[in-house]
């Protein structure tokens, strides 16, 4: 049985370092951007994340791309 994965939604997430807790462990906040084109190149998304992070007060820690797919039976 063959299954086809159809891209539905992509999101871009930026994990920002917002400081430290009382035990000096890093604290993070995530900023999500929805409605990213499912066929966007990873290099382009990383460049966009870098540009967006330059507008933030807090330093960028991680860039994530979250893709969702629908699976259909052929």
Image (tube, grey):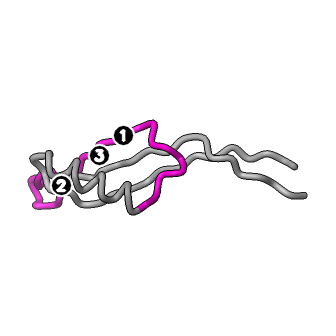
Q: Report the quarter where the N terminus lies.
A: bottom right
Q: Earlier in the sequence, mark 3 or mark 2?
A: 2
Q: Position of residue 36 (x, y in %)?
A: 45, 42
**Which residue in the rendered view is the most extreme toward the right?**
1
The reply to whether callout 1 and callout 3 are in contact (CB within 8 Å) is: no
Which residue bears the numbered disc 3? 30
Does 22 appear in magenta?
Answer: yes
Where in the figure is residue 26, as x and y percent of width and height? 17, 59
Residues at marks 3 and 2, CA–CA distance in whole angstroms: 9 Å
Q: Are marks 2 and 1 in contact (CB under 8 Å)?
A: no
Residue 69 horizontal/vertical position (percent): 64, 46
Residue furthest to the top in view is 35
- Classify mark 2: helix, strand or loop: strand
| Helix, strand or loop under label 1 | strand
Query: What residue range appears in magenta?
Result: 18-42
Mark carried by residue 33:
1
54 vs 36, left or right, is left
User: Label 2 vs label 1: CA separation?
Assistant: 17 Å
Task: Identify which residue is drawn at 22% across, 52% down.
Answer: 51
Residue 52's tag is none
Q: Are marks 3 and 2 in contact (CB under 8 Å)?
A: no
| 46 falls in the magenta region | no
Give the residue pinned by disc 2.
17
| Crowdedness near tag 2: few (<14), some (14–19) or many (≥20) residues, C-alpha within 10 Å | some
Horizontal placement of 1 versus 66: left or right?
A: right
């Amino acid at each position: 049985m063959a299954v086809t994965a159809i891209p539905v939604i992509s999101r871009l997430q930026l994990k920002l370092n917002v400081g430290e807790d009382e035990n000096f462990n890093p604290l993070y906040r995530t900023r999500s951007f929805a409605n990213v084109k499912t066929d966007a190149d990873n290099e382009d998304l990383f460049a966009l994340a870098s540009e967006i992070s330059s507008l933030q007060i807090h330093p960028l820690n991680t860039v994530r791309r979250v893709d969702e797919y629908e699976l259909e039976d052929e």
